[in-house]
Image: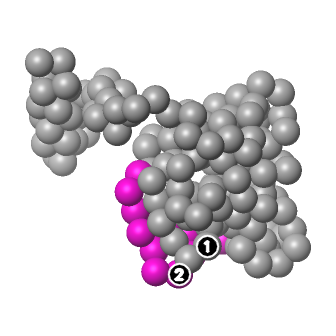
Amino acid sequence: MTIDGNTATDEGGGVLNFDTATFINATITGNTAGGGSGIGLAGLAAATTSVTASVVVENDADDNVQLLSGTTNSFSSGGYNIVGGGNGIAAFAASGGVSGVEFPLADGWRERVPLHQLAPLIVHAIKFGGGYAAATDEAARSVRRLLA
């Protein structure tokens, strides 16, 4: 899953979580907000955000994982994450992970996103049809331009 290029006028540019959210193999980058540009967590006792094998970097103002209110830091890491800054990074010390990093993505990564989305889009297009067929076609065109 890729969450990229979103803007919120207040909080939670990529994700604003008040309940339960789980991210596995996700890329959350290039988002902008007044707080919690990558993942904003409400800080409620019932709100939990679990992140495993994901990249959460290069979101605006270096608040990639941000506890927005309250005192409960219920971010949890399954490990193997690359996470930029934010007041929630203490939860990302699990094995195999790196936190507090800047710009770990190689130049040109945005142009390669459709390449990584293509296989899951094909599966969804076969199984569900509809809008997935159009998204698959667009991703395939982007990949062809990338490889030309």
Start and end of the magenta stretch? Answer: 4-19
Q: Amino acid at mark 1?
A: Gly
Q: Is 13 placed above or below 131 here?
A: below
- At a point 76% along the width and 78% down the height, the residue shown is 69
Horizontal side of 22 relative to 59 (left or right) equals right
Horizontal side of 108 relative to 66 (left or right) equals left
Horizontal side of 140 relative to 17 (left or right) equals left
Q: Secondary structure at mark 2?
A: loop
Residue 20 x/y as whole percent: 67, 59
* The N terminus sits in image quarter: top left
User: What residue is pinned by disc 1?
Assistant: 35
Does the CB distance between marks 2 and 1 fall below 8 Å?
yes
Mark yes or no: residue 39 visible.
no
User: What residue is pinned by disc 2?
Assistant: 10
Q: Is 119 placed above or below 27 here?
A: above
Marks 2/1: CA–CA distance: 7 Å
